[in-house]
Structures are given as structure tokens and as C-alpha cells.
Image (cartoon, rainbow, N blue to C red):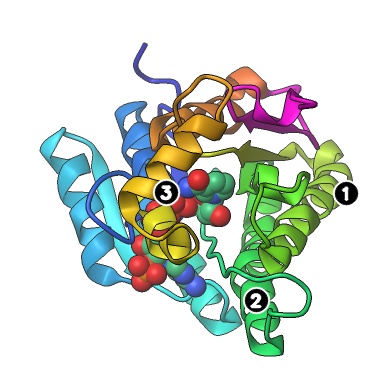
């Protein structure tokens, strides 16, 4: 079914991928474009965003890239202006950027604690702060925030700063959803579980030893026997971003194959 985001303009942050293959942001940017959205693909890594743009344009879609660190207010403001310059409006804000750092309460450094909260949480606050006045002026919009099952559950490894930042995203989501509900702006979150994306090999391979071990452990930990992938996250985001979810607000979709429902 094509055209689920026809005539919409979407900002997707972290629309590149940290490595070869499909990250959540890259898959979401491509899927949004396949469904008719014009996409501003934002990334710290301009080359990674260009790769996403090339895929979208090869498929006949519309995409412009913007290099920005979404944890810096001035760069976020420039990003929103860049979207208005390119497409004249912004209907969807997809806050995908997130990073991990291994460590529990004792091992985690203050620097890592601050860095993760800045990149994972403050970036969402800054992007919403910059986009909301524009959505309000337009009379509506949809925001999708990428949290994590790690924000509501212990995921088997010490990951305290990540867990804290991802948990807080849910409260930010609810706060915005209720404040803006009467203005036609919806805000929801997606909680991915164990997904097979390039980021996991970059961020947690140290804990498990090597790439094969990461995949083996995460597949075994999934109730389905297999990790999910970036497209599973992208399809949940597509629904929340689309008008099909017009009465869905202040909530979240868990995309984890049942992981968080399991007691043992
Ligand atoms: P990814 O696509 O591989 O990485 C996203 C992109 O974000 C990278 O190109 C990265 O650039 C960029 N980025 C990092 N910091 C940025 C910043 N400050 N400003 C702008 N761009 C920035 O990652 P992913 O695996 O799909 O993860 C995406 C989201 O899903 C994250 O929020 C993550 O926490 C969440 N998630 C993932 C999983 C999973 O299992 N993979 C599970 C739960 C939640 P650089 O390469 O330059 O860093």
C-alpha cells in the first residue's frame, strides 16, 4: 500500500547508519519516502545521510540531507529552518538519534552519563522545541520518538545511562502529547527490543567478545529465536506518523517479539 504519507514532509534524525546495512533511522527514512513523504535526512555523518538520500532518489522518492548534531540547539534550529527552506513545512518529526554506553552505576563515568542524556534525551527536547511552533502554526503534526525496551526493562547487561535516558523519553512523549493534543499535534514513541542493526555491533561487541557472539546471544534471548530488524521499527513508526493513527496519542508501540512480556 503506497501513499500512507502522501504530501507529508518528514524530518528523520539519525537517517544514516553507523555501519553497512540498515539502521533504524535509515530504514525509516526510506520507508517514509516510499509512502510518499518528502524527507529531510538529518545526520551527524553527512556521508551516511547522502547514502540514504541516494537510495530514496534511486527509488523515485524525494530527499534532502542536512548535517546536524541534534544535541546542539543552534544546529537543531538550523535543521528546522533547512526543512522549511527545502519543503516549506514540517508534518512529521521522527526522533531516531540514540547512542549506547556500557556500564552500571559504578563503572559509568559522569562524562558518559552526561553525554548519553545529551544525545538521547536532550536532542529530543531540542528537536520538539524547535518543531512544535511550526506544527502549531500549520495546525497539526506527528512526532515519533525512538525509546527502547531498555528504558522499561533490564536488558541483561549494565546499561544504566542508556536505560535512564530511554525511560525519560516516555515521559517527554506523554508531556508533549497532552500539552498539544487539542492543537492537532500527536506525540508517540516506539520501543525497539533486540534489533539487528549496525549500531549494536559498534556499541556492545566489547561486552560479548565479538560480532558473532553478539548475534548469537541476542537471537537466543529473543522469544522468536531471532532479533528483529530496522524495518520492524520503521513500520511501527510509519503507522504512528501517518493519519491512520489520528486518535493515537501519548502512548507507545513495543517492537520486541514479546521480549518485554516474558516473566522468565
Ligand atoms: P544507526 O542507524 O546505526 O545510527 C543512527 C545515526 O545517528 C548514525 O548515522 C549516527 O551518526 C547518527 N547520530 C549519532 N549521534 C547523532 C547526533 N548527535 N546528531 C545527529 N546524528 C547523530 O542506529 P540504530 O541502531 O538504527 O539506532 C537508532 C535508534 O534506535 C537509537 O535511538 C537507538 O537507541 C534505538 N534502539 C536501537 C535498538 C537496537 O537494537 N538496534 C534497540 C532499541 C532502541 P554517527 O555514525 O556519526 O554516529
Residue 214's x, y, as percent?
42, 48
Picture quadrant of residue 86: bottom left
Which numbered tag is attached to residue 118? 2
Tell me the residue at 76%/22% (across/down): 247
User: Helix, strand, or loop for circle 3?
Assistant: helix
On the rendered image, what quadrant is the N terminus found in? top left
Could you say which is closer to the camera, residue 113 or residue 43? 113
Instruction: Please rate how many residues cluster around mark 2, counting C-alpha atoms within 10 Å: few if below 14, some from 14 to 19, many from 20.
Output: some
Q: In the drawing, what numbered circle is on residue 179?
A: 1
Callout 1: helix, strand or loop?
helix
Q: Residues within 10 Å of mark 3 (few under 14, many from 20)?
A: some
Q: Position of residue 197 (x, y in %)?
A: 38, 46
Using the numbered discs, state the Cα–Cα distance from disc 3 to disc 2 in whole angstroms: 27 Å
Q: Which mark is residue 214?
A: 3
Q: What's the distance in space between the residues labelled 3 and 1, CA to CA?
A: 41 Å
Looking at marks 3 and 2 on the same chain, the residue that comes earlier in the sequence is marked by: 2
| Front residue of 253 and 206 | 206
Which region is colored magenta? 246-264
Amino acid at each position: 500500500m503506497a501513499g500512507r504519507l502522501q504530501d507529508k514532509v518528514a524530518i528523520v534524525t539519525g537517517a544514516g547508519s553507523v555501519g553497512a546495512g540498515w539502521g533504524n533511522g535509515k530504514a525509516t527514512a526510506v520507508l517514509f519516502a516510499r509512502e510518499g513523504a518528502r524527507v529531510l535526512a538529518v545526520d551527524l555523518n553527512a556521508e551516511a545521510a547522502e547514502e540514504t538520500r541516494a537510495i530514496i532518489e534511486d527509488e523515485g522518492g524525494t530527499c534532502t540531507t542536512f548535517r546536524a548534531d541534534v544535541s546542539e540547539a543552534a544546529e537543531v534550529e538550523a535543521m528546522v529552518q533547512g526543512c522549511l527552506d527545502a519543503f516549506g513545512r514540517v508534518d512529521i518529526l521522527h526522533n531516531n538519534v540514540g547512542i549506547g554506553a556500557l556500564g552500571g552505576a559504578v563503572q559509568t563515568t559522569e562524562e558518559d552519563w552526561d553525554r548519553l542524556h545529551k544525545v538521547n534525551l536532550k536532542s529530543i527536547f531540542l528537536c520538539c522545541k524547535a518543531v512544535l511552533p511550526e506544527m502549531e502554526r500549520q495546525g497539526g503534526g506527528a512526532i515519533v520518538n525512538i525509546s527502547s525496551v531498555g528504558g522499561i526493562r533490564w536488558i541483561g547487561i549494565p546499561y544504566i545511562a542508556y536505560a535512564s535516558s530511554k525511560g525519560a523519553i516516555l515521559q517527554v512523549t506523554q508531556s508533549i502529547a497532552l500539552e498539544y493534543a487539542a492543537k492537532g499535534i500527536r506525540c508517540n514513541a516506539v520501543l525497539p527490543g533486540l534489533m539487528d542493526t549496525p549500531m549494536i555491533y559498534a556499541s556492545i561487541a566489547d561486552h560479548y567478545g565479538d560480532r558473532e557472539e553478539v548475534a548469537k546471544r541476542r537471537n537466543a534471548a529473543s522469544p522468536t529465536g531471532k532479533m528483529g530488524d530496522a524495518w520492524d521499527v520503521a513500520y511501527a513508526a510509519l503507522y504512528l506518523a501517518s493519519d491512520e493513527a489520528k486518535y493515537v496519542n501519548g502512548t507507545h508501540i513495543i517492537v520486541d517479539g514479546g521480549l518485554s512480556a516474558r516473566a522468565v
